[in-house]
Amino acid sequence: MTKKPVTLGVISDTHGLLRPEAVEALRGSDRILHAGDIGTPDIFEALAKIAPVTAVRGNVDTASWARDLPATEAVEIGGVSIYMLHDRGRLDLKPQAAGFRVVIYGHSHQPKIEEENGVLYFNPGSAGPRRFHLPVSVGRLMIETGKVQAELVELKI
């Protein structure tokens, strides 16, 4: 476990639109996690100027540039195991049994933070085009000495 606090920027459902407000909200992140429906490869380039990016493929990421993106990803950051996928409905394992503390997902465009059986489920919402009357948002995960705190950041657009 690392002693240094780690800040993760969490973003999803950009659908090819990276708003300046999202870039500003993610600034200062040690790493950025993108939960899919990226839309275009230039989103990676812009996010990578802020911090290293780990991303999974979403259901709209079907172009040739996205073929190498994994459908799921497991990362360990700050002593915390994180499982990433785009659609929580396609979760194919029991996170607690598999040793994951956090599951990051997107797809629904609905920001949500909930804890079940010791696992934090975190959807940062959609940072791209507004859908219905849902907020446009990103998220942050702060990890310190193995403890995780999640925060939603609604973008003022």
Image (cartoon, rainbow, N blue to C red):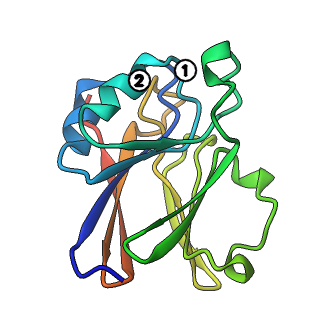
Residue 26 in the image: x percent, y percent?
26, 43
Image height check: is 51 above or below 123?
above
* Residue at numbered disc 2: 43
Number of marks in the rendered image: 2
- Quarter holding the C terminus is top left
Q: Which amino acid does label 2 sit on?
A: Ile
Give the residue at x 65% y 34%. 58
Give the residue at x 58% y 30%. 37
Q: Which of 111 and 118 is in front in this view?
A: 118
- Quarter holding the N terminus is bottom left
Q: What element carries label 2?
A: helix
Residue 134 in the image: x percent, y percent?
48, 38
Q: Is mark 1 on a helix, strand or loop?
A: loop
Give the residue at x 79% y 67%. 93
Q: Which amino acid does label 1 sit on?
A: Gly
* Residue at numbered disc 1: 39
Distance between mark 2 and mark 1 Cα atoms: 8 Å
Residue 98 in the image: x percent, y percent?
71, 77
Q: In this view, does 10 lie to the left or right of 113?
A: left
| Quadrant in the picture for residue 137 | top left
Image height check: is 52 above or below 127?
below
Instruction: Answer few, some or many: residues within 10 Å of disc 2's Cα (few below 14, many 20 plus, some between 14 and 19).
Output: some
Residue 79 in the image: x percent, y percent?
42, 77
Give the residue at x 63% y 34%. 69
Do tag 2 and tag 1 residues touch (Cβ < 8 Å)?
A: yes
Q: Which of 34 and 150 is in front in this view?
A: 34
